Amino acid sequence: ARRLDAPCHVIPHGVDLERFTPRPQRDAQNDLGWDHDARHVLFPYPTGREVKDFPRAKRVVDDARERVDAPVELQTVSGVPHDRMSVYMNAADALLVTSRREGSPNSVKEAMACNLPVVSTDVGDVRERLVGVTHSHVCTSDEELVAALATTLNAGERSDGREAAREVSVERTTERLLGVYQSVLSD
């Protein structure tokens, strides 16, 4: 919007707060067969998509592993039906985004809706989305990503992102879209 030389509206894609809702982590881990004693870092993208930068995610997790007092597992997930993604969000201890560029990543908003802490590069609207969300971090360097991920995993707590996710719920997005249409029709 800042680059356009005209009035415009930016409305992020909405997240379904009924599908993406917090549930007990242990139950979600049982559903997936994940080790309860490990810390699970979720990378919900195809590892071959260059823009998502899986090699960076792997390096960050490998380095963070040395700073965490529990086993750390990097969980890569892709090709899973969308209605199952909330199980992964609830089973994980952190969402890791190492993307080189993004717009308004749905995975971040879905993680927020499940109270999953997010550790991310400074891409798209992630910084704006995570303002005030506990145990979540926006980073500009690999060292910051490693430190933030280790801190988040050692805290072992969920975030309070669900409240912030309400701003990008399907309902709120629909209201904003209708508002734009109504303003155009009234002009």
Image (tube, rainbow, N blue to C red):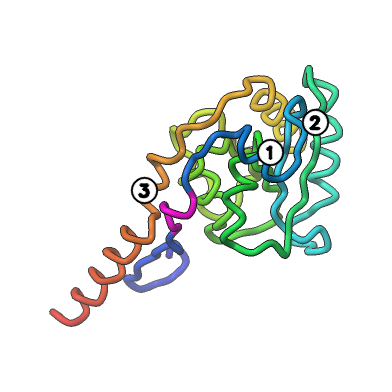
Where, by quadrant of the figure, is residue 34 drawn?
top right
* Residue 166: mark in rendering: 3
Distance from the alpha carbon under mark 3 to that under mark 2: 30 Å
Q: Which residues are magenta?
A: 15-20
Tell me residue 140's x, y (percent): 67, 40
User: As rendered, which of 70 and 101 lies closer to the eye?
Assistant: 70
Which residue is found at the position 31% from the left and 66% from the top?
A: 174
User: As rendered, which of 72 and 8 lies closer to the eye?
Assistant: 72
Q: Residues within 10 Å of mark 1 (few under 14, many from 20)?
A: few
* Residue 72: mark in rendering: 2
Distance from the alpha carbon under mark 2 to that under mark 1: 17 Å
Between label 3 and label 1, give the one nearer the viewer.
Answer: 1
SS assignment at label 3: helix
* Residue 30: mark in rendering: 1
Counting residues from the start of the chain, the first of labels 2 and 1 encountered is 1
Tell me residue 158's x, y (percent): 54, 30
Tell me residue 162's x, y (percent): 43, 41
Considering the whole magenta stretch, tell me its main secondary structure.
Answer: loop
Where, by quadrant of the figure, is residue 105 drawn?
bottom right
Counting residues from the start of the chain, the first of labels 3 and 1 encountered is 1
Between label 2 and label 1, give the one nearer the viewer.
Answer: 1
Counting residues from the start of the chain, the first of labels 3 and 2 encountered is 2
Q: Residues within 10 Å of mark 3 (few under 14, many from 20)?
A: some
